[in-house]
């Protein structure tokens, strides 16, 4: 496993961010998407730093969230609550430091609204390889692998992949 993965932000560090913590608690909608196994939610657990990742699949978000919280309480190194069938963007927040946006209203006065931005939890001095993983629903490190715990066969070592779920960087939308 590449050294850079050792520097990945853990869920415990991410949950110190109140916006991310509140967003993660809220049950997301996966709409009419169908998961062949009937269990669209997956929790990855890494017991110790640099160790192997174990996984569990769940039918409901509440089951997966409770399982994740239970493992965090046990003192594991890292966990991730992922969705196997739908991508998720980062939390959206109103940013009053940005100038207001004008909305033209036909037949009425113009409205001014605060601009919104994506909120991606970060820490000072974090590894610059962190990107928002749309399936893991968190910032993770995307780096090069020839073997990955989420893929049974060898993978193309020339593509950057999420250190947790294994999705290729070119396959996910980039958020800043």
Image (cartoon, rainbow, N blue to C red):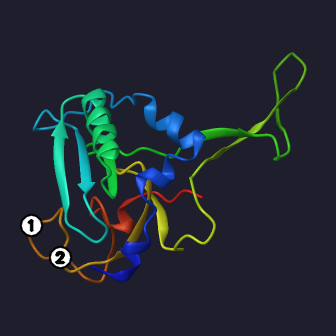
Which x, y percent locates residue 96?
81, 40
> Mark 2: few, some, or many residues within 10 Å (few <14, many ≥20)?
some
Q: Nearer the viewer, residue 105 or 81?
A: 81
**Residue at point 38%, 74% (across, down):** 6
Q: Nearer the viewer, residue 110 or 130?
A: 130
Instruction: Look at mark 1 in the image and give the residue it sits on.
Output: 152
Which x, y percent locates residue 47?
25, 58
Which x, y percent locates residue 109?
90, 20
Instruction: Look at mark 2 in the image and give the residue it sits on.
Output: 147
> Mark 1: few, some, or many residues within 10 Å (few <14, many ≥20)?
few
Left/right of residue 56 with respect to residue 14 in the rendered view: left
Question: For the residue labelled by badge 2, is the local secondary structure a helix, a strand or a loop?
Answer: loop
Quadrant hosting residue 72: top left
Name the quadrant of the C terminus: bottom right
Left/right of residue 140 with respect to residue 41 in the rendered view: right
Question: CA gap, disc 2 to disc 1?
Answer: 8 Å
**Residue at point 32%, 81% (across, down):** 2
Q: How many circles with numbers are drawn on the protein? A: 2
Question: For the residue labelled by badge 1, is the local secondary structure a helix, a strand or a loop?
Answer: loop
């Amino acid at each position: 496993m590449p050294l850079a993965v050792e520097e990945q932000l853990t869920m415990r560090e991410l949950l110190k961010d109140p916006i991310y913590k509140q967003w993660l608690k809220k049950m997301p909608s996966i709409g009419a998407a169908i998961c062949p196994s009937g269990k669209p939610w997956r929790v990855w657990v890494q017991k110790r730093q640099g160790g192997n990742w174990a996984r569990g699949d769940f039918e409901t978000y509440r089951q997966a969230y409770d399982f994740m919280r239970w493992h965090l309480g046990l003192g594991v190194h890292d966990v991730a609550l992922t969705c196997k069938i739908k991508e998720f963007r980062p939390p959206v927040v109103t940013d009053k430091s940005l100038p207001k946006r004008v909305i033209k209203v036909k037949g009425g006065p113009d409205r001014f609204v605060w601009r919104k931005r994506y909120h991606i939890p970060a820490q000072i001095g974090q590894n610059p390889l962190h990107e928002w993983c749309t399936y893991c629903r968190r910032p993770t490190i995307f780096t090069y692998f020839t073997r990955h715990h989420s893929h049974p066969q060898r993978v193309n070592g020339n593509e950057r992949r999420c250190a947790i779920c294994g999705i290729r960087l070119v396959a996910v939308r980039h958020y800043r």
